[in-house]
Image (spheres, rainbow, N blue to C red):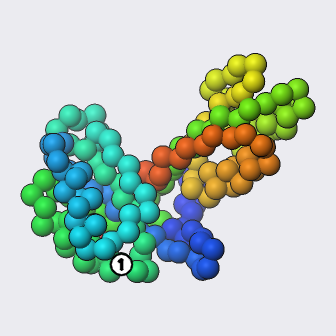
Amino acid sequence: MSAVPESYVGSSSTSPVTHHILSVLVENKAGVLARIAGLFARRGFNIYSLAVAPAEGHARFSRITIVVDAENTPLEQIVGQLDKLVNVVAISDLSPRDAVERELLLASVKVDELTRPAVLEAVANASASIVDVDAGAVTIMLAGTPAACDQFERRLEAFSDVELHRTGRVALSRLGRTNN
């Protein structure tokens, strides 16, 4: 039995923000990402997160996961503009019901004898992993839903010296389900 995916609803300081996740299969050629980013910039579309990697182990194609603000940007216009680009092979709008989405968070936290137990407890409670340790710091990895990464990031704010990086979302359709 699979878990129910979380919705696209995030938050901002003023109101909830709804996002669309687009999975764009492109030919792996120089300049494709620049053309896509340029299209978003020219049209005034805001990219909330962007992740790119080779698709399904083929060097010929890459999959770009783009998270966009759904309230301020007409999705049909984005898809129509992307579809006009020569190197775009396929575009899928991934709905929460039909997709699995994850994000990677890496954090380095300075620790001493007093803070180390609290950091280890935070790691255990979040089902995160320690990927590097030295006398004065630990490096932590969490791969999870955006909400899980948000929650863990808030937990890490309790520590005084934290360096943190998040990848942005990646998402795929659940096999056996259709997407838009």
Residue 56 at least partly seen: yes
Which residue is at the far front?
A: 161
Residue at the spot x=67%, y=50% of the render? 153
Q: Quadrant of residue 141?
A: top right
Disc 1 marks a residue whose amino acid type is Thr
The percent position of residue 45, horizontal first and vertical second, equals: 33, 72
Outermost residue, left side: 86
At x 40%, y 80%, the residue is 72
- The answer to whether residue 154 is left or right of residue 4 is right
- Which residue is rendered at x = 43% and y = 72% of the image? 69
Which image quarter: residue 29? top left
Identity of the residue drawn at 46% across and 70% down: 19
Q: Position of residue 20 (x, y in %)?
A: 41, 69
Q: Which residue in the structure is indicated by mark 1? A: 73
Q: Does 28 sit left or right of 109 as displayed?
A: left
| Tally of numbered tags | 1
Residue 70 higher or lower than 160, as above or below: below
User: Going by the image, does 57 lie left or right of 166?
Assistant: left
Q: Position of residue 9 (x, y in %)?
A: 55, 71
In-front residue for pair 148/15? 15
- What x and y, as percent, mark residue 156? 73, 46
> Would you identify the image quadrant in which residue 163 lies?
top right
Please, what secondary structure does the residue beneath circle 1 have? loop
Report whether 122 appears left or right of 86. Answer: right
The residue nearer to you, when weighing 169 against 7, is: 169
Image quarter of the C terminus: bottom left
In the rendered image, is residue 171 in sight?
A: no
In the figure, 172 relative to 68: above or below?
Answer: above
The residue nearer to you, when weighing 72 against 19, is 72
Q: Residues within 10 Å of mark 1 (few under 14, many from 20)?
A: some
| Residue, far top | 135
Measured along the vertical axis of the image, is residue 62 above or below residue 93? above
